[in-house]
Amino acid sequence: MIDNLMQPKRILVLYYSFSSQTKKLVQSLLDGMAEYEAEVVCERIVPAIPQHFPIGTIPKTIKKMIVTLFRQRVPIEPLPRHCFESYDLILLAGPTWSYNPSGPVLSLLDRDGKQLFGQQAVIPVISCRGFWRLHWWGIKSLLKRLGARVPNGIIFTHTSKEPWCTIGVFLKLAGETPERLSWMKEHYPKYGHTRQQLDEARRFGEMIARAVTQNQELERLEFNTQLALYEK
Ligand SMILES: Cc1cc2nc3c(=O)[nH]c(=O)nc-3n(C[C@H](O)[C@H](O)[C@H](O)COP(=O)(O)O)c2cc1C
C-alpha cells in the first residue's frame, strides 16, 4: 500500500504530426509537465509508409482531402511494448484531416485501441485549422466505445482569419509559401499555431501534471480558452 503511494504518477503521450504543428504543441505540453514529478513517456505514431509534407501539388492535395474525408487509414509501425502498460493518463494527439482524426491515428485506434485505451483516462489533443467539432465528437465516441474514460479535451485552432486560413493551409499543403505571396501575406502571416498558443499549451501541460500528481479531477481543468479555441 505504502509502495503504491510512493510510485510516481505516469502519463503516456502518443502523437502523430504531419506538418509539425501537433509536434510543437506536444513539445510545449511536455515542457509544462516537466515542472511536476510525474513520469512522462512520449511516443510518436510512425506511418509504415513515410508521409511527405508538403504533399507537393494541387491535384495530390485535393486527392488527399477526398480520401481522408472517407477516413482512409494510414498503416503504422508497431508501438513499443511500454505503451501498453498502465498509465494514470494518456494524451492522444494529432491533426484533423477532413473533419476526422488523421489516418495514422485511425489505424492506431483500429489496431491497438482496446489494448491501449480500455479502462484508461484519455485526453484527446487536436491541432486543426478551425473545423474541429466532428473530429472531437468522433474521437470521443470511438475512445468511449473502446472502454476509455474521456475526462477532457484540448483543441488548438490556427489563428488566421477565414477565408485566408483555409486558403493558406491548402496552399501550404500543396507546397506553396502563402505567407510570402503578395496577395496573401497581409492576411496570412503564418501557417499553424502561434508562439502564444505554444505558451498556452505549456501552461496546459503544467495543469495536467499538477492534476495527475495531486489526484485532482481532470474534468475540472479549463482548456476552453481564447488562445486554444481561437475566435476568428
Ligand atoms: C489532408 C488534410 C485535411 C485537413 N482537413 C482539415 C479539416 O477538415 N479541418 C481543419 O480544421 N483542418 C484541417 N486540416 C489542417 C490541419 O488539421 C492543420 O494544419 C493541423 O494544424 C496540422 O497538424 P500537424 O502539423 O500536426 O499535422 C487538414 C490537413 C490535411 C493534411
Image (cartoon, rainbow, N blue to C red):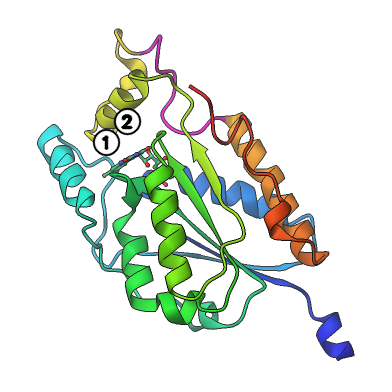
Ligand 1 neighbours mark 2 (CB distance < 8 Å) = yes
- As drawn, 53 above or below 162: below
- Residue 17 seen in the figure: no
Residue under label 2: 169
| Ligand 1 lies in quarter | top left
Asked whether disc 1 touches disc 2, contact meaning CB atoms under 8 Å apart, the reply is: yes
Q: Residue at x 75, y 61 (%)?
A: 217
- The magenta segment is 185-194
Viewer-closest of 162 and 188:
162
User: Where residue 228 appears, x then y in whole percent?
Assistant: 58, 36
- Residue 193 seen in the figure: yes
User: Where residue 166 appears, x then y in whole percent?
Assistant: 32, 27
Residue under label 1: 173
Name the secondary structure under disc 1: helix
Q: Which residue is drawn at 89% across and 88% down?
A: 2
Mark 2 neighbour class, 10 Å CA radius: few under 14, some 14 to 19, many 20 or more: many
- As drawn, 129 above or below 141: above
Q: Residue at x 58, y 74 (%)?
A: 120
Separation of marks 1 and 2 at Cα, in angstroms: 6 Å
User: Where residue 199 appears, x then y in whole percent?
Assistant: 66, 37
Name the secondary structure under disc 2: helix
Q: Magenta span: helix, strand or loop, mainly?
A: loop
Q: Is residue 97 left or right of residue 65?
A: right
Amino acid carrying mark 2 in the image: Val
